[in-house]
Amino acid sequence: MALNLDAVGKKIGPISKDYTWKDAVLYALGVGAGFSELEYCYEKDLKVIPSFAITTLYEVMPEALRLTNINVPGMLHGEQELIFHNPIPPKGTMTSEGKILNYYDKGEKKGALVVAETETRHSNGQKLFTSNMTIFSRLDGGFGGENRPRKPVEFPDRAPDFSVDASPAENQPLIYRLSGDVFQLHVDPEFAKMAGFEKPIMHGLCTHGYACRALIQSLIPGEPEKARRMNCRFSRPLYPGMPLRVLIWKTGEGQAVWRIQNVETQEIVIDNGIFEYGDIPKDEVRFDDRVAVVTGAGAGLGRVYALELAKRGAKVVVNDLGGARDGSGEGSASPADTVVDEIKALGGEAVANYDNVATVEGGEGIVKSALDTFGTLDILINNAGILRDKSFLKMDPQNWHAVLDVHLNGAYNVTRPAFAVMKAKGYGRILMTTSAAGLYGNFGQTNYTAAKMALIGLMNTLKLEGQKYDIHVNTVAPVAASRLTEDVLPPDFFAKLKPEFVAPLALYLCSEECADTGNIYNAGMGCYNRAAIVTGPGAVVGDGRTVPSPEELVEAWEKVKTLKGAKTYFQLNDQIGDLIGAFSKPAADAGTAEPTSMSVSDIFKGMPNAFVSEAAQGVEVVFQYIITGSDGGDWYCDIKDGACTIQAGKHEKPVCTLEMEDKNFLAMMTGKLPAMQAYTSGKLKIGGDIMKSQLIEKLFKM
C-alpha cells in the first residue's frame, strides 16, 4: 500500500457535527475541568474551551486517511494548529470543509508527513476556527518528495513565567474518549500491549486540552474567547495517572510558547507549543488578493460595487460598454475609465474593459482582461443591463431580443468562461442581478421581467454544478437609483434609493465568509429580505393509477392551492422525492423495525448473489450506503457493464447516497419495512440522484 500522491488538493467534507451543551461539558470534564472552572462545566452562562474544536477531527481524520491512503498502523498525530476566529457557541452544528494541503518525505524508513487543512463554521454562519493537522506516517516515507523545512520554536533561556501542574486520573481516557476518539489504544490493555505499550495511553489531544486550560488560566484567566492561535507538536506518550506540568513563557504582547513535561520522567510529551491571545479583531469582509469582474460598472450600482470591492482589497475589472440606457449607440470608454481612475485615486488596482456582454466574444474578452491583468478571477457580478419598455402587444422582436441579449445572454456569455476559471481553481463567487419586477411582475416590461426571472433558473442549476468546487451563486434583486430607474420611480422615492444601500448585501454574497448559495435577496433603502420559490403541501387526487377528472380536482382545489406549510426545495430531486412519497402510506404506519439475527455486513456480502445482471444492461451507477449505529459502516455498490462490485468504504463519486440506521436498514432489506415507508418516515435519507434509487429493487432480489 502506498500513499495516494494525487490526493493533494482533494476536498475534505463538508462534514457536520451536531452538538449540545452536554457535549461541551463532557469534553471539559475529559480534559480535567471541574468545580474550579465551573464556567466550562455548568450550562448556566457556559463557555466552551476553545480546544473543543479538536472534536471535529474525529470525523475529518477518517476522510483524510481515505483520501491519502496512509498506512494506518504507522500513523501518529504529529502536529496540530488551531486558529480561532470566533468563540464556539454552547450548541449548534459545526460544519468542516477543507483539503489535503501537502506531502513531505522524510526518507526511506523515516516516514512521511501529510498535511490537511479544514475550516469550520457554525450553523449561525460564523467562521469558528481553522485547523491545520499534520499526520506523521512512519511507514510511508521514501517516495521521492521534498522534506518539510524546519521551523524551530525558540524558547527563552530562563525559567518559565508560569508552571501549571495537573494530575490526570487513571480513568481519564475513559471519559475523554466519549468526545469522539474511541481508538482502542486508549482503552484496551491487550491492544496497547500489541502496539508496544505496557497499558493504554492518554490521548495526545486530551493532554492538549489540559494545555489549553492552563494557557487560558495563566494568560487570559476567565476569558477563553481571547484565545487566537494554538500550535504544537506531539512528542511522546503519557500514561494515565502520571502527573504533567505545563510550562509557559511569555514572548511578547499576546504571544507565548509552551510545552508539557511528564513530571515523573522529566520527558517533554508535547513540544514547540505556540499560543497567541488577545481581543479577536472584529470580522471585516475583505477581498485581499481576490480578483473581481463587475459588468455594467461605469455608473450606478456597478460603479458602487467596483469601488467598494476595491476599497476592501479586491483587484477589479471595470466593464462597461458605455452605451445608452436602451443599449443603442457605439459605446464610449469614458464611464469605465472614470471609475478606474476613482479606484486608483483611492490606492486600489483596477483595469477598464469595454466589451459588450451581449456577445460570446465580449464575454470571453471580459474574463481575458482579468486573466491578462491580474492572473486569475474569483468574483463575478453580472450587473449590466438595458431597458426597452413597451406594453406586450407593442413589444416587437427587436426590443424583446435586445433586452434578453444583455440581461440573460450577457450573464451566460460572461459566466461561462468565468465558471471555467473558478472550477479549475476550486473557488468562486458569482452574483446574478434579478429585479422585483421579474419576481413579482411590472406593467410594460415583459422583455425585462422574462430575462430577470430566467436568471433565477440559471442560478439554480449553477449552484448545483458549482457546489463541489466551492463556487457559490446567489442573486440580488436591487431597488436602487440608476439611469434604468430614474424615470420609472417617483422623484422623491428615487432620491432615497442610493445604490450604496445595496452594496453591503452584494459584497457579503461575494465574500469568502458567505456560505449561502442558490438564494435570492431583495435590497433597497437598507431593507433586506430573502425571496424564494415555495411549494405548498398540495393534495393527492385519485390513487395515482387512474387519471382524476377535473371535477375531482375542483373538489380538492383549496388544498391544492394553499401555501400553508409551504417549503423550499434546493434541487429538482428533492421535489421529486416528495412527489414519489405522496403516494406512500403515512409515516405513522411505517412501524418500528423488529430485531433480526442478520448483520449489516451479511447483507452486503449477500448482495452480489442477489444481483440481477439482466436488469443491469446499460446501467452505470454507484450507490453509496452509509449505515449508522453499532452494526453500521460504509459500503458502496458499483454497477457497470452488467456487473456488480460491492466494496467497504466510501466512493469518491457516488451517484446516489442512501443513509440509514442499522436496525432500520436490516428491517428494510428483510422485507419488514417497505422502502417507500422508510423514505417518507425519515428512516431512509437519499442524496444525489434520487431517481436512480428506484433502480435498486429491480437490480437486486433479496
Image: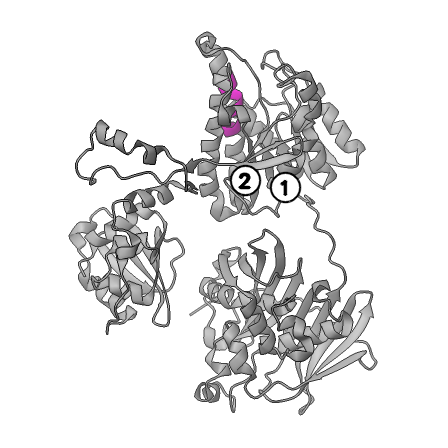
Q: Secondary structure at mark 1?
A: helix
Query: Residue at the location (51% across, 77% down)?
Result: 177
Left or right: 470 in relation to 665: right
Q: How many dots with numbers?
A: 2
Hey, what amino acid is under mark 2?
A: Val
Residue 421, numbered label: 2
In the rendered image, is residue 234 in sight? no
Left or right: 28 in relation to 60: right
The span picked out in magenta is: 403-413
Q: Quadrant of residue 556?
A: top left
User: Which corner quadrant holds the C terminus?
Assistant: bottom left
Q: Is residue 171 above or below residue 520?
A: below
Residue 600: x, y in percent? 29, 68
Query: Residue at the location (20% across, 61% down)?
Result: 671
Left or right: 18 in relation to 685: right
Q: Secondary structure at mark 2?
A: helix
Residue 6, numbered label: none
Q: Which residue is mark 1?
A: 508
Residue 356: x, y in percent? 58, 21
